[in-house]
């Protein structure tokens, strides 16, 4: 499903966290990208999400080359296929939990009523229904994390990309998040998780672990 | 097609950045308020001048020798009446009286109430109880402001004019003009024609000028040419020339004001735009997050357009709704003086209501697109760059 072929990414200034990297991820597979901070994990996720373009090499997802997609096509590709969970959540602070979750679907033709119903369903599945109308800046770290997960799921994506999802969570919340990832996996979604948290790695025994070092 | 969901999102963003948008709205409101006030004052003055001009004679004939204006013989009027197309030719007595105490000039107009053709504003004044005043050799009709000023100085309604020979003529205020009677006429004193001639030092067989009335406007230029041929030592001023002069005066004043205002505005706008409408770190991050969530560049620009349009429309409506009462209810304090000049005896006049849709549209088009562009362009620049770095 996801094929990266000899991908290199060199940033302005000459830093190349990814160099000649190749990878294949099957549909429904859970993959953990493991490595220290600065090893290139986040860059790999950004490349898979077509948020940045590789300097060289090809990235193919579902047979579609995404490496050189024009900006708007890349956005539409993300809207239809990808859910991203950011390390720092990146929720919009002036909105409530349910409003944040609705954001990805606002440009679509769906009615606000339908979008809100979807968002409420996902919030309920994450035991967050009672926090729906609370401003996200007033939510705890764990609640913000679940809101970010709900937002990543609102467009029913085939692929979930999670960047250091446990970085800001305590043990209990990490366990809860692990359960959520298992459920996503059971639903047949492809999960790519960038983490250096060994506890998360151990909690997802079926996941394929890819160790990443500097300048892979 | 407006996406109501994105519009709601944009309005939410405005509410989340209240401080910034209140400041920007205030700047835009002030700009629109000042621009609209200038346009409305100019429009009202033009309208006021046109009212005054309507009551003026079609042609004014003055005698001129060696480039200096002289008093004209009254019997010239009889000769002018012989020109076909002329309905009235009336000798007029008027002139400027210098009142040093107030450092002001007062215009004295002598009125012959039996002349048969009086200008509309004088006729209004005469009908308003002024007839008796003008029949008396010592009666005068003044603007309300002048009457108040003289009463304040002398504690009664009498004022002594000094004649050219050094003697004095004492006059009593018998009536005042209504403020609506006109901007120009309200700085005028009306009195009996013989008394006016005495104060101004005009011989009894002379007049200041001759007012000629031509019922058919199409014939005015032809008659003006005939008068020039008949009396080569005269200057002929048609109503159209005076209209053009007023037009130039208002255009000049509003032009100078707008030029200075535009330079200040431009400088202020650049500083404000640079400081407040540029995309800050938080907004760049928000744009990057939206892109990561699947927003196209046009989706992001729609949001930014809605934000800018909402602020611009709000500021525009507020600016216009403040400018209308400022000009037409409160008579544009401070700003009116820029256009009418200032003196202690400046006439009290009411700006007639004159709302121009085209001027209002021009104001909107000169502010809203500039502001919208100053929001859209940085947002576009941010939206077309890679989002990856902004949200790591």
Image (tube, coloured by chain):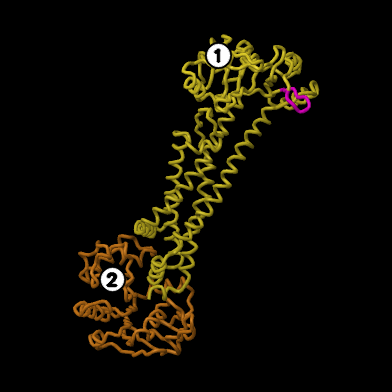
Q: Is residue B36 visible?
A: yes
Looking at the image, which is closer to me, A25 or A50? A50
Q: Write the residue at 67% across / 16% down.
A: B201
Question: Dot 2: what SS?
Answer: helix
Decide if residue B358 is on the left or right side of residue B71: left
- Closest to the observer, B65 or A33: B65
- The chain coloured yellow in the image: B
Q: Position of residue A155 (x, y in %)?
A: 33, 70
Could you tell me residue B333's position as x and y percent? 47, 36
- Viewer-side label of 2, 1: 1
Q: Which residues are magenta?
A: B61-69
> Which mark identifies residue B22?
none
Please rate how many residues cluster around mark 1, counting C-alpha atoms within 10 Å: few if below 14, some from 14 to 19, many from 20.
some
Tell me the subunit letter for badge 2.
A
Q: Quadrant of the N terminus of chain B?
A: bottom left
Q: Is residue B90 visible?
A: no
């Amino acid at each position: 499903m996801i094929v990266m072929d000899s991908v290199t990414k060199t940033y302005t200034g000459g830093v190349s966290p990814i160099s000649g990297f190749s990878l294949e991820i099957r549909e429904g597979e859970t993959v953990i990208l493991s490595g220290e901070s600065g090893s290139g994990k986040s860059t790999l996720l950004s490349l898979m999400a077509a948020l940045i373009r590789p300097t060289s090499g090809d990235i193919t997802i579902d047979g579609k080359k995404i490496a050189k997609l024009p900006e708007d096509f890349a956005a539409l590709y993300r809207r239809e296929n990808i859910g991203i969970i950011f390390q720092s959540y990146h929720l919009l602070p002036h909105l409530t939990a349910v409003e944040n979750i609705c954001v990805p679907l606002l440009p679509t033709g769906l009615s606000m009523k339908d979008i809100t119903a979807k968002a409420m369903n996902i919030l309920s599945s994450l035991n967050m229904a009672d926090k729906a109308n609370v401003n996200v800046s007033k939510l705890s770290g764990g609640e913000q994390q679940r809101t970010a997960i709900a937002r990543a799921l609102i467009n029913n994506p085939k692929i979930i990309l999670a960047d250091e999802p446990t970085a800001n969570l305590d043990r209990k919340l990490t366990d809860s998040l692990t359960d959520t990832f298992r459920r996503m996996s059971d639903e047949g979604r492809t999960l790519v998780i960038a983490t250096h948290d060994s506890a998360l790695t151990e909690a997802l025994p079926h996941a394929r672990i890819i160790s990443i070092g500097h300048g892979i | 097609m407006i996406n109501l969901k994105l519009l709601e999102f944009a309005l939410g963003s405005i509410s989340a950045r209240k401080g910034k948008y209140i400041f920007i709205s205030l700047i835009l409101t002030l700009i629109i308020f000042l621009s609209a006030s200038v346009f409305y004052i100019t429009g009202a003055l033009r309208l006021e001048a046109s009212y005054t001009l309507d009551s003026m004679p079609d042609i004014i004939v003055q005698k001129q020798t060696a480039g200096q204006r002289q008093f004209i013989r009254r019997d010239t009027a009889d000769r002018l009446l012989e020109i076909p197309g002329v309905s009235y030719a009336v000798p007029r007595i008027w002139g400027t009286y210098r009142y040093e105490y107030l450092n002001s000039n007062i215009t004295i107009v002598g009125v012959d109430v039996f002349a048969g053709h009086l200008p509309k504003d004088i006729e209004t004044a005469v009908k308003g109880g002024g007839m008796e005043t003008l029949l008396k050799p010592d009666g005068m009709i003044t603007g309300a402001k002048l009457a108040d000023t003289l009463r304040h100085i002398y504690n009664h309604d009498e004022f002594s004019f000094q004649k050219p020979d050094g003697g004095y003529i004492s006059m009593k205020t018998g009536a005042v003009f209504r403020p609506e009677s006109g901007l120009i006429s309200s700085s005028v004193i009306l009195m009996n024609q013989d008394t006016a001639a005495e104060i101004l030092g005009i011989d009894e067989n002379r007049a200041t000028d001759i007012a000629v009335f031509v019922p058919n406007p199409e014939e005015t230029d032809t008659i003006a040419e005939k008068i020039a041929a008949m009396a080569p030592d005269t200057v002929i001023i048609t109503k159209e020339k005076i209209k053009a002069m007023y037009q130039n005066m208002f255009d000049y004043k509003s032009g100078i004001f707008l030029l200075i205002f535009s330079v200040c505005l431009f400088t202020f706008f650049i500083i404000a735009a640079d400081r407040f409408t540029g995309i800050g770190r938080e907004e760049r991050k928000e744009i990057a997050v939206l892109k990561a969530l699947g927003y196209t560049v046009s989706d992001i620009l729609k949001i930014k357009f809605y934000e800018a349009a909402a602020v611009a429309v709000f500021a525009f409506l507020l600016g216009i709704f403040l400018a209308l009462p400022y000009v037409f209810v409160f008579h544009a304090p401070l700003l009116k003086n820029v256009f009418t000049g200032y003196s202690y005896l400046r006439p009290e006049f009411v700006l007639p209501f004159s709302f121009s849709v085209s001027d209002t549209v021009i104001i909107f088009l000169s502010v809203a697109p500039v502001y919208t562009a100053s929001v859209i362009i940085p947002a576009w620049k941010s939206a077309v760059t890679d989002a990856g770095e902004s949200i790591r």
